[in-house]
């Protein structure tokens, strides 16, 4: 099978190298300005670089569009008609509605569509990483070809029935997960401090929160913007998260202890009842991964981001454990630390007491509340430009700490998932 990849950014190059490594004939293209650099990097590996997607399409048995979700329509409109009869076409976007719409509109009727979604970032090789395969216009033989292709590079394949199911699961697992971490990053930026310098953010749960936030902001804004804005299911999820956070915050500042506690425990009983198979994150491992370098005493933290997450799951009727089929490392860690908090009654009570009565943490919670509102509004308005600008402001605030955070996060994930 000749594999053509249109779009040789981080993920396109990653998979081009993986296919070439196991012996497939691979070629691809990107923007003209990138050609010389790609030739230098990829042609020594046997990956040929063409001028455009027409040349790639004319020779490929499988075409993978590895471009941003917001540009998929434009790119497929430009090159889609050049696909040969019987070609298999896939997309690598993380939201499938705009991708399938573009394929249906611009591809010839005599090509097959079996699309994919790598459930990991470019910092991880495909081997042993989850990858979703989603048939759309296919048959048993073509589907098996795609299965065999990705099994050959070691992918841990998740089979999803259609693109609607895919986008619903991704909204449940990624959109709200990311906006929670993005809101933490924005809150710390607006408060003007790095969390590892604050005693309220010392300890196992907070180490995971900090490192996962740094990991997310170490990547490119367009990945998360597409997930949140172009997925029709995601806006509903993000809005629910914002409502949950706002309602909890109001109960906190009014010190409505009875209603607040009852609400938290009702959400706990829905999400974490005993039939769930626990993730059981290792506390000793989580405590190792601190950026502070200080032996300060840990202060209680309200963990408002986690309380809001579980409350949102409850009100959406979402069972997050069911969605582990499409887990990403940030989602598994976020569910893991929520589980760790909610299944430890002493720690959960400490969190509730801090949320209701600890005025030293209230300012940070206000910043978080404002950040959730900002992110929810940007996503609700479908403001792609505003999303990227907001994201990049936080990215600039953390600066060179992002790379360190990404590396430590990868090691933390490896240790916790062993």
Image (cartoon, grey):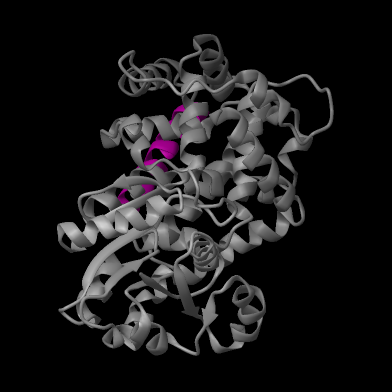
Give the image location of residue 345, x and y in percent: 49, 10
Number of numbered callouts drawn: 0
Image quadrant assignment for residue 202: top right
Q: Is residue 68 left or right of residue 236?
A: right
User: Residue 297, percent across and down?
Assistant: 78, 19
Q: Is residue 289 above or below residue 111?
A: above
Q: Quadrant of the C terminus?
A: top right
Q: Which residue of the protein is positioned furthest toward the right in this rendering?
A: 294
Residue at the spot 38% in from the left edge and 48% down from the top edge: 238
Q: Residue at x 60, y 74 (%)?
A: 42
Give the percent coordinates (x, y) of residue 247.
40, 35
Task: Indicate whether residue 250 is drawn in magenta.
Answer: yes
Relative to 359, 76 lies left or right: left
| Residue 187 visible here | no
- Left or right for 96, reference 11: left
Magenta stretch, residue numbers:
234-253
Specify the farthest residue to the top.
Answer: 346
What residue is shown at x 64% (from left), y 85% (from top)? 36
The residue lying toward the viewer, choosing from 268 and 353, is: 268
Q: Quadrant of residue 145?
A: bottom left
Above or below residue 78? Residue 196 is: above
Residue 262 as seen in the image, left or right of residue 186: left
- In the rendered view of the protein, which quadrant contains the N terminus? bottom left
Could you say which is closer to the camera, residue 228 or residue 365?
Answer: 228
Whether residue 233 is situated above or below residue 230 in the rendered picture? above
Any magenta on residue 13? Answer: no
Residue lying furthest front:
23
Query: Magenta stretch mostly in which secondary structure?
Result: helix
Q: Is residue 400 visible?
A: yes
Q: Name the foreground residue: 120 vs 223.
A: 120
Q: Position of residue 69 (x, y in %)?
A: 40, 68
């Amino acid at each position: 099978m000749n594999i053509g990849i249109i779009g040789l950014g981080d993920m396109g190059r990653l998979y081009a190298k993986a296919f070439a490594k196991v012996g497939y004939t691979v070629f691809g293209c990107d923007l003209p300005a990138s050609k010389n650099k790609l030739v230098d990097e990829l042609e020594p590996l046997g990956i040929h670089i063409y001028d455009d997607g027409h040349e790639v399409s004319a020779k490929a048995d499988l075409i993978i569009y590895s471009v941003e979700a917001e540009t998929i329509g434009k790119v497929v409109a430009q090159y889609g008609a050049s696909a040969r009869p019987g070609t298999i076409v896939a997309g690598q976007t993380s939201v499938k509605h705009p991708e399938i719409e573009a394929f249906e509109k611009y591809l010839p009727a005599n090509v097959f569509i079996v699309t994919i979604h790598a459930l990991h970032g470019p910092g991880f090789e495909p081997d042993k990483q989850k990858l979703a395969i989603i048939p759309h216009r296919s048959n048993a033989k073509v589907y098996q070809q795609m299965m065999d292709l990705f099994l050959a590079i070691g992918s841990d394949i998740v089979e999803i029935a259609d693109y609607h199911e895919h986008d619903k699961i991704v909204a449940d697992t990624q959109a709200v997960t990311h906006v929670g971490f993005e809101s933490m990053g924005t809150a710390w930026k607006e408060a003007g401090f790095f969390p590892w310098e604050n005693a309220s953010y010392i300890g196992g749960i907070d180490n995971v929160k900090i490192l996962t936030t740094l990991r997310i902001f170490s990547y490119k804004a367009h990945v998360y913007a597409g997930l949140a804005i172009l997925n029709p299911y995601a806006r509903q999820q993000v809005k629910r998260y914002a409502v949950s956070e706002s309602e909890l915050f109001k109960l906190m500042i009014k010190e409505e202890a009875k209603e607040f506690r009852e609400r938290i425990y009702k959400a706990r009983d829905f999400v974490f009842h005993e039939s769930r198979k626990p993730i059981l994150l290792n506390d000793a491992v989580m405590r190792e991964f601190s950026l502070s370098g200080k032996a300060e005493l840990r202060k209680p933290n309200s963990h408002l981001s986690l309380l809001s997450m579980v409350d949102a799951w409850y009100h959406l009727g979402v069972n997050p454990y069911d969605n582990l089929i499409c887990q990403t490392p940030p989602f598994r860690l976020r569910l893991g630390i929520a589980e760790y908090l909610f299944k430890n009654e002493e720690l959960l009570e400490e969190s509730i007491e801090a949320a209701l009565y600890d005025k030293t943490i209230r300012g940070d919670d206000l910043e978080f509340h404002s950040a959730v509102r900002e992110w929810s509004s940007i996503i609700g308005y479908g403001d792609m430009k505003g999303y990227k600008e907001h994201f990049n402001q936080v990215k600039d605030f953390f600066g060179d700490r992002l790379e360190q955070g990404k590396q430590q996060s990868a090691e933390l994930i490896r240790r916790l998932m062993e």
